[in-house]
Image: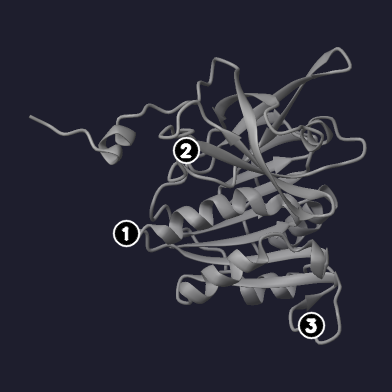
Amino acid sequence: MYLLTPRSISSERKPVLDPQVWQEFSLKEKIVISPNTALYRFALPHPEDILGLPIGQHISVSAEINGKDIMRSYTPTSSDDDLGHFDLLIKSYEKGNISRYVSLLQIGQKIRVKGPKGQFKYHPSLTREIGMIAGGTGITPVLQIIRAALKNPLDLTKLSLIYANVNFEDILLKKELDELAAKHPRRFKVYYVLNNAPEGWRGGVGFVSKDQIAEHLPPTDHNIKILMCGPPPMMNAMKKHLDELKYPAPRTVSKLVDQVSVVCHFSRRTLLIFDVLQVFLF
């Protein structure tokens, strides 16, 4: 005879996501992060449900806007440890389609979601060390991997992050990043770079440079991977720096539409979002 506890019931829950079927999820909560960025929490059908998104993958969000079905891709900041909901960190753009649509949602209103999407899946100790460069909202796919790696005591991967923004107030989730770095000093380090640095700033100033990459990220090696996520001009500059530092060149393996431009390098694997999400292999 077995007693079904809440924990055992939740362990039997199947993932809610279906890569072939669009599903609707209601907005449960909105948490404003900055003047144009918010965390949107969407409810799953049951309190014990999990989204079912593998680490390293993303979802498609669809809405009918001006009579047309528009689709964009996003990486949830939540994980399958978060029961009953999933979170999207979205920066709204004046001319954005889905981002503006989501920013105007009222509690209880719905979005359509399908997934998982993407050919890359992170798994514990995928490599000895991962170096990361993120710009703006490009932090979301990076943070997904950071959280997964650091919460697993069996995952020994070391992580180094360079996170670039225009102003200090643009740094998203800084408190969490700093807390993770303080809690895991031997496994995770973060270095911030600002275009407009405030007085007394101790991080980098200007644009991310080749010297900063060489100083704060691991050198190229067969057991080292580089993840890079940010806007197109930044990514073009970073690709040039990486090439000069002898990192291998990427090749495209898949594409998905997205509003925010992002590139993710996984030494032999890179994710590029430039209105179209492109996944590269290094």
> Which residue is most to the right?
95
Residue 54: assigned label: 2
Q: Which of 273 and 84 is in front in this view?
A: 84
Q: Is residue 214 shown left or right of residue 221?
A: right
Q: Could you tell me which quadrant the N terminus lies in? A: top left
Q: Which class describes the residues within 10 Å of circle 2: few (<14), some (14-19), or many (20+)?
A: some
Q: Can residue 267 be seen in this view?
A: no
Kindly report which numbered mark, 3 or 1, lies closer to the viewer in this rendering: 3
121 in relation to 213, above or below: above
Where disc 3 sits, the SS reads loop
The disc, 2 or 1, on the residue closer to the chain's N-terminal end is: 2
Residue 72: assigned label: none
The part of the image, by quadrant, that contains residue 113 is: top right
Say whether marks 3 and 1 touch (CB < 8 Å): no
Question: How far apart in space, not on screen, are marks 3 and 2 (Cα)?
Answer: 37 Å
Residue labelled with disc 3: 201
The residue type indicated by label 3 comes to: Trp
Q: Where is residue 82 in the image (x, y as percent from the top left)?
A: 47, 44
Residue 154: assigned label: 1
The disc, 3 or 2, on the residue closer to the chain's N-terminal end is: 2
Q: Which class describes the residues within 10 Å of circle 3: few (<14), some (14-19), or many (20+)?
A: few
Q: Where is residue 146 in the image (x, y as percent from the top left)?
A: 52, 57
